[in-house]
Amino acid sequence: MGKFPPSPSEEKLKEEICKVMRRLFNRGLVSALSGNISARLPGANEFWITPSGIFKGEIEPEDLLKVNLDGKVISGFLKPSVETPFHAVIYRKRADVNAIIHSHNPIATGLALAGIEIKPVTVESAIIVRKVKIVPWAPPGTDKLANLIGEYIGDSRALILMNHGVVGIGRDLLEAEAIVEALEESSMIQFIASLFRRDLPVIPEEDIKINKENMGV
């Protein structure tokens, strides 16, 4: 392990992973030891992932590990995230995905636990997040969880793991970050609105389609 230095593009990718993790920590979407991020160069059969047991608010590029699509570490010296198996599953199933974020969004996870469907109450959630699937409980870091995520991911961009957190995926880190943040923002708005009324207005499908076309997504 660690015989071949990463290309400059990989170095930039590693720096971006760390920046995103620090931003999520500052927003309260990951905590000291929770959450993980991975990313790969387009078309690559390996990905970089954050380690386990490292303070997320100060993670550095040298802490990351390079892993192949079978989940085997090929570069790095720390222990990879316990959730490496489900990251590998998503990359195997989705060639369009180059970044995965597993955060612990409190409001989105709370709504799922309460059995409340997260609806398109904001433009961002309707266009960026789209339909959110709920993955049944499975212990973290297990093949059972990885297999479930593989079954549920389909063409989704965001999943909520019951009793656990959120998974957001994207063509790059910025898109994956935007998805998990938009999901939490929408969940907060929905939660607040639901305190005062039951029948929440949502954005009409035809308007969602128009906005997608205008934004080129």
Image (cartoon, helix red, strand yellow):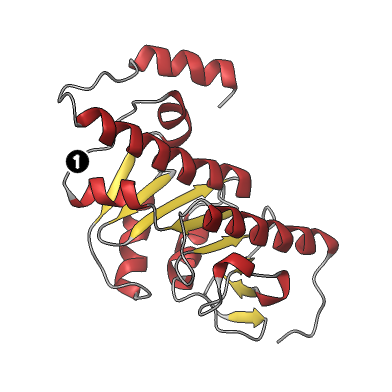
Task: Point out the image quarter for the C terminus.
Answer: top right
Residue 171 lies in quadrant: top right
Q: Nearer the viewer, residue 128 or 188?
A: 188
| Res 131 seen here | no
Residue 62 placement (x, y as % from top left): 72, 75
Residue picked out by circle 1: 116
Q: Nearer the viewer, residue 38 or 22?
A: 22
Please give the name of the residue rendered at 36% of the width and 49% of the height, measured from the top-left corner: 159
Q: Would residue 111 appear left or right of 206 to someone viewing this image?
A: left
How far across and down, in percent of the image, does residue 135 sit? Answer: 27, 55
The structure residue drawn at horizontal position 65% and vertical position 81%, both measured from the top left corner, is 74
Residue name at image x 60 percent, y 74 percent: 67
Side of 97 relative to 28 (left or right): right
In the drawing, does residue 98 fall left or right of residue 211?
Answer: right
**Residue 13 visible here:** yes
The quadrant in which residue 118 appears is: top left
Looking at the image, residue 216 lies above or below residue 63: above
Residue 177 screen position, x and y as percent: 55, 47
